[in-house]
Amino acid sequence: MSLDPATTRRIARLARIGLDDQETEAVRTQLGGILGWIEILNEVEVEGVPPMVGTSMNAALPQREDIVTDGDCQEKVLSNAPDRAGPFFTVPKVVE
Amino acid sequence: MLTDLTIAQAAEGLRRRDFSAAELTKAHTGAIGQLNERLNAYITVTADKAEAAAAQADKALAAGDAPTLTGIPLGIKDLFCTEGVKTTAASRILGNFVPPYESTVTANLLKNGAVFLGKTNLDEFAMGSANLTSAFGEVENPWHRTGDASVLVPGGSSGGSAAAVAAHIAMGATGTDTGGSIRQPAAYCGIVGLKPTYGRCSRWGTIAFASSLDQAGPMTRTVEDAAIMLQAMAGHDPKDSTSADLAVPDYRAATTRSLKGLRVGIPAEYRPEGMSAELLAVWQKGIDMLRDAGCEIVDVSLPHTKYGLATYYIIAPAECSSNLARYDGVRFGVRAEGAASLDDLYEKTRHDGFGEEVRRRILVGTYVLSAGYYDAYYLKAQKVRTLIRRDFTSAFEKVDVLLTPTAPTAAFGRDEKPEDPVQMYLNDIFTVPASMAGQPAMSVPVALDSRGLPLGLQLIGRHFDEETLIAAGAALEKAAAFSARPDLRAGAAA
């Protein structure tokens, strides 16, 4: 299994991880190796086998009343912000 | 020495007033001061907080009726959010993160009176098997080969917890296990590590890696101590929708349970080609010990074992790519400087903030979930996962517990680390299948190899039957009489 550079760049873009050319090439080789190794699963017959979705042994997803249980803690929410302006998180300018 | 006591012994000594909680905590913070610079088992040491908690514990003990863990000093893997104490997941991206809330597991331990010594080191975001990927430096295994000073890895990802417990700079520690991260480092460091059934301990407030696999558990020097700690950690939590609403049994009582008639399965597939004769011999020794304790030994087959790792390395990265999407440099964590646009901010922050292995897993996960590849990889892996789970279900129709080796080798040298990521993944070959199926499993140290390093055996149980693991583990521990201690430890440091 080998990945082409364009696919590697597309994946990095989807994951929002910036890679330079050298890193892209290293990732391309390593991902190719891992994906090649994973191909062992082609041997397994899965016709008619349902996918296992989650591991929970609970019979049903638990539900609760639709009421407010938390909130009014603006300072806690913002306490780890890398940058803030008053009660807001900030980001670089997105509109020209 | 106070640092040599087990949790059970210390709890008794505290109640007899042989020593105070303050003295017990001081003995540990002192030993951390001497050893941590070298071992790097703790990322953050909270000595002042620990001393204040110990003073509280002494008051509770004097008043009587103090819960079991009152005054017991523990290490907390730096993946559990602790209110007001920096929690990093061993990542640069969370290098300055101070949670404004407490995880359910640590809150349960605090309610039970435990004293937290600090936050233990791990592989970044718990992704690794050798504790080589922490942004805060590598952890040294307190064990060394006989007559050889080479630095060995402690295993991972809960390597800081394992090293701290083995070196007697914590009486016990919390770990988390996604594919072997409690059991494999426990085996490498000669201690007990218990991964409970998925759903037994709440995941709320534990930094997520792969949500369908992550499970918290205790790491201790004895099986009884693991039972005591699990008792405090476990329990239903409405804040985790996968948390099991089941009564938590008396785990400590299980340590003295008779094994007469217990059926122990030996899976044929855990004997891959090239397995060392030494490890096979230790496994056989474990089989003999359980037979002597009254167990019936039964050969079983788990035919999809060889597909466990490949399945894991689709499912776990897929879930990780989704869970780690939250680290964007906007709401919390570290933000990269000098970004020109929002996209640039994301890409720079996530490139600089994550280490190489974490980036690699996010990218693998993104790939297997991306349009055109989802069915071939992710859906296929979910189906194989069903088959792996069925293997365990049918095995447990014939037997009550399984016995296997925990890891394919003893601890390896820091400079013997394989360059190929796939080779590194093979460390988890025996631990991953139980994680995939949600089974509880425990590693117990059984013997030293010819080079003087500990080897562990793994017990795998039925869902929510940690008691049988504890009963069989206690029997193995008793028969093995494993009393070796690492050369690097409190009171014996070189």
Image: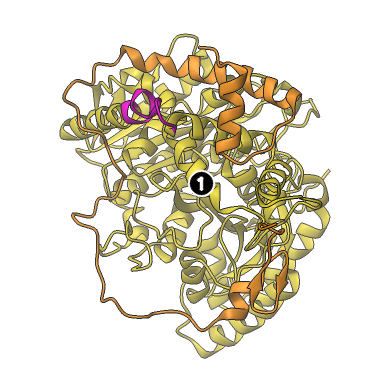
Chain colours: A orange, B yellow
In the rendered structure, which segment of residues is drawn in magenta?
Answer: B370-380
Q: Residue at x 55, y 72 (%)?
A: B101
Q: Is residue B118 left or right of residue B223?
A: right
Tell me residue B92's x, y (percent). Answer: 72, 50
Is B267 covered by the magenta stretch? no
Quarter-wise, where is residue B411 in the image?
A: top right
* Above or below, A73 relative to B261: below
Q: Quadrant of the C terminus of chain B?
A: top right
Tell me residue A66's x, y (percent). Answer: 28, 76
- The chain that hosts pointer 1 is B
Q: Residue at x 32, y 41 (%)?
A: B439
Q: Residue at x 35, y 58 (%)?
A: B251
Front one among B424 and B275: B424
Front one among B346 and B411: B346
In the picture of the structure, the residue carrying the numbered disc 1 is B209
Q: Residue at x 66, y 67 (%)?
A: B98
